[in-house]
């Protein structure tokens, strides 16, 4: 009878310990689930932010490549030199049209300023254009102003440019090294500096987006690794907790016998 009651008491204490352990474990699991849910929402937002930054940078690369980079690569005026201004004069009046409203166009005129320069590196006499846009609009004229209603304003603007060029005998210019063009440019529409500064921000955005995604993935990997290690430790502790009461009851039973 005494042996039976001792064994029953040992079993009761073991079951009571297991119940307490299960309750503590349930609270532990509930807290961990809440923490994991909050972390998962934050990780999802971070990944969404990183992917949005990557997508934005790719779109910016696409826009820049079809506009600035394409214009820069298609330009043949790649070599920089200095030019001596030989002549700067208005040769004619060019007709142009300007918008006066919805489906309304009126005609006007602008003076054509023609500038001849001598390329110092080769001695060739060439026409000077302001940039690629002016050369495409009218290769005979140095500058093509925006067409306006007031002809006097455009005429005054072109004359001021002519006077400035006459005072500057030496000007920087860009020429075609293959010598197939009869024009040189005063400035390039998109130079190396403009291309570099334009590609800098999409590159920074792309790198930051990739770093955000990589750090979130690394955090998730480390979290899974820590969870696996904690599971192994919990399994070892539960086996040890089950083994100690059984040994204690066995020792108590043998001592009573």
Image (cartoon, rainbow, N blue to C red):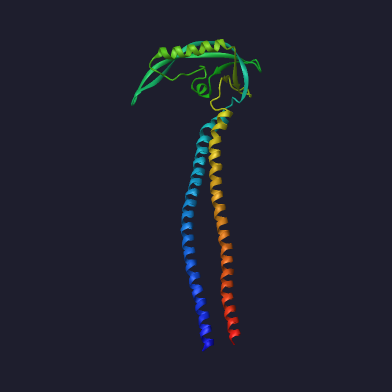
Residue sticking out furthest to the bottom: 1
Q: Nearer the viewer, residue 87 or 233?
A: 233
Query: How far from the left and from the top, in percent, is residue 121?
Result: 66, 18
Can residue 74 be seen by looking at this rendering? no
Identify the residue at image location x=49%, y=66%.
24
Q: Nearer the viewer, residue 125 or 99?
A: 99
Q: Quadrant of residue 221?
A: bottom right
Number of residue marks: 0
Query: How far from the left and from the top, in percent, is residue 216?
Result: 54, 51
In the image, taking residue 122 as reference, residue 25 lies left or right, namely left
Query: How far from the left and from the top, in percent, is residue 168?
Result: 57, 12
Which quarter of the figure is the C terminus placed in? bottom right
Residue sticking out furthest to the right: 121
Identify the residue at image location x=53%, y=40%.
205
Q: Nearer the viewer, residue 104 or 250?
A: 250
Identify the residue at image location x=52%, y=21%.
135
Identify the residue at image location x=54%, y=14%.
115
Q: Quadrant of residue 81?
A: top right
Q: Is residue 15 above or below residue 2?
A: above
Query: How far from the left and from the top, in percent, is residue 179?
Result: 62, 22
Q: Is residue 205 above or below residue 8?
A: above
Q: Nearer the viewer, residue 163 or 203?
A: 203
Q: Is residue 136 above or below residue 41?
A: above
Q: Quadrant of residue 85?
A: top right
Can residue 217 be seen by looking at this rendering? yes
């Amino acid at each position: 009878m005494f042996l039976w009651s001792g064994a029953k008491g040992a079993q009761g204490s073991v079951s009571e310990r297991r119940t307490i352990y299960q309750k503590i474990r349930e609270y532990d699991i509930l807290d961990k689930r809440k923490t994991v849910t909050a972390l998962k929402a934050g990780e999802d937002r971070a990944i969404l932010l990183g992917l949005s930054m990557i997508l934005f940078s790719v779109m910016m690369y696409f826009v820049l490549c079809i506009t600035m980079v394409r214009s820069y690569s298609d330009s043949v005026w790649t070599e920089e030199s200095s030019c001596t201004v030989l002549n700067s004069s208005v040769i004619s009046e060019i007709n142009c049209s300007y918008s006066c409203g919805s489906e309304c166009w009126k005609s006007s005129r602008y003076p054509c300023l023609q500038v001849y320069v001598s390329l110092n590196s080769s001695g060739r006499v060439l026409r000077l254009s302001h940039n690629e846009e002016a050369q495409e609009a009218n290769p005979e004229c140095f500058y093509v102003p925006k067409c306006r209603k007031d002809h006097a304003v455009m005429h005054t603007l072109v004359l001021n440019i002519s006077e400035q060029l006459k005072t500057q005998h030496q000007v920087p210019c860009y020429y075609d090294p293959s010598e197939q063009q009869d024009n040189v440019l005063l400035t390039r529409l998109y130079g190396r500096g403009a291309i570099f500064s334009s590609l800098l921000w999409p590159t920074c955005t792309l790198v930051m987006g990739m770093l955000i995604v990589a750090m979130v993935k690394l955090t998730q990997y480390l979290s899974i690794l820590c969870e696996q290690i904690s599971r192994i430790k919990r399994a070892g502790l539960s086996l040890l907790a089950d083994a100690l009461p059984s040994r204690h009851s066995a020792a108590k039973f043998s001592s009573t016998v």
